[in-house]
Amino acid sequence: MKRIIGIDLGTTNSLCATVFDEGPEVIGESENAVTPSVLSRIDSGWLVGQEAQERRISNPNNTIFSIKRLMGRELKELGDVVSELPYQIVQAERKLLKVRIVESEHYYDFTPQELSAEILKKVKQRAEVALGESIEKAVITVPAYFDDAQRQATRVAAKIAGLEVARIINEPTAAAIAYGLDEKKDLQNEGHVAVYDLGGGTFDISILKLSGKIFKVVATHGNTHLGGDDFDMAVVEILKNRIL
């Protein structure tokens, strides 16, 4: 049976895990298991991860981050996000959006799915090197409030990256399972659990109902424009007002 990996495709960082005989384990050594969700255009190709992260200052216009915020969204839905990002976002056909990369006198437009696929390719490649085998299937987590368009965009990104999506799982559900709540004796029959996720670009809280070993999201709410990136921008604005 071919191995399946689980991928946390995050706004700021991404990582993957798989199940061994001893149980689930994050793939990669502790100090480099996380791949920054950043990519930078260079010589008609992409640097992805830490190498791209180091170019956010030297080449900000062509270094892309926070792609997760753009997945399955229309330009009008982004609000202030567009003005806060150093790279260009343009209106494309059918109300979709694209990220524009400018090289010399030419420009190239990429969909968020294409860019997200580059991050997934990197995660997939690192998993294959660590495991010594090819990876074709993955379970990918998404925020519980992701709508159909955002979930489909995630599937498209995975397909471009050469991955078949075995399943899309809500992040709060995955967190509850990872924490072992499905094995807690005091919740074995039925119970409710609140899970909140404050990430690099999004914040959400979900109420899960546990019945037996099955989790169901019964309520969720969140903010797609509240996360670590926004804290950084708030600090920048405070410093600008004090210094300038």
Image (cartoon, rainbow, N blue to C red):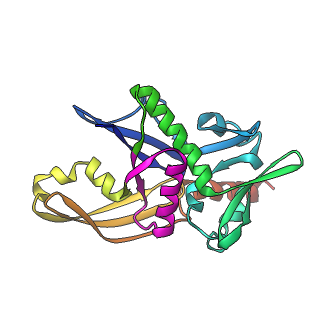
Q: Where does the image place residue 102, in percent across and percent down from the top left? A: 81, 50
> Could you tell me which residue is drawn at 81 percent across and 52 percent down?
107
Compare residues 179 and 140 and report the one nearer the observer: 140
Q: Specify whether residue 66 is in view.
A: no
Location of residue 59 with respect to 109 vertically, above or below:
above
Compared with 189, 124 (above or below) is: above
- Residue for point 64% across, 43% down: 39
| Quadrant holding the C terminus | bottom right
Q: Residue furthest right?
A: 105
- Spot the residue most to the front: 1
Q: In this view, does 145 lie to the left or right of 161?
A: left
Q: Position of residue 168 (x, y in %)?
A: 38, 57
Q: What stretch is highlighted in magenta?
A: 138-166
Q: Is 120 situated left or right of 92 in this image? A: left
Specify whether 60 is left or right of 30.
right
Residue 189 to residue 218: above or below: above
> Which residue appears at 37% of the width and 39% of the height?
17
* Depth check, front residue: 26 or 98: 98
The image shows residue 241 at horizontal and vertical percentages of 75, 60
Q: Which residue is drawn at 61% across and 57% down?
A: 112
Q: Reply yes or no: does residue 153 show up in magenta.
A: yes
Examine the image and state in which quarter residue 235 appears. Answer: bottom right
Q: Position of residue 11 (x, y in %)?
A: 53, 52
Seen from the viewer's position, the closer of residues 165 and 37 is 165
Q: Does the magenta stretch include residue 34?
A: no
**Image mark count:** 0
In the picture, residue 104 is in which quadrant?
Answer: top right
- Quadrant into which the N terminus falls: top left
Examine the rendering and report whether any part of residue 13 can be seen. Answer: yes
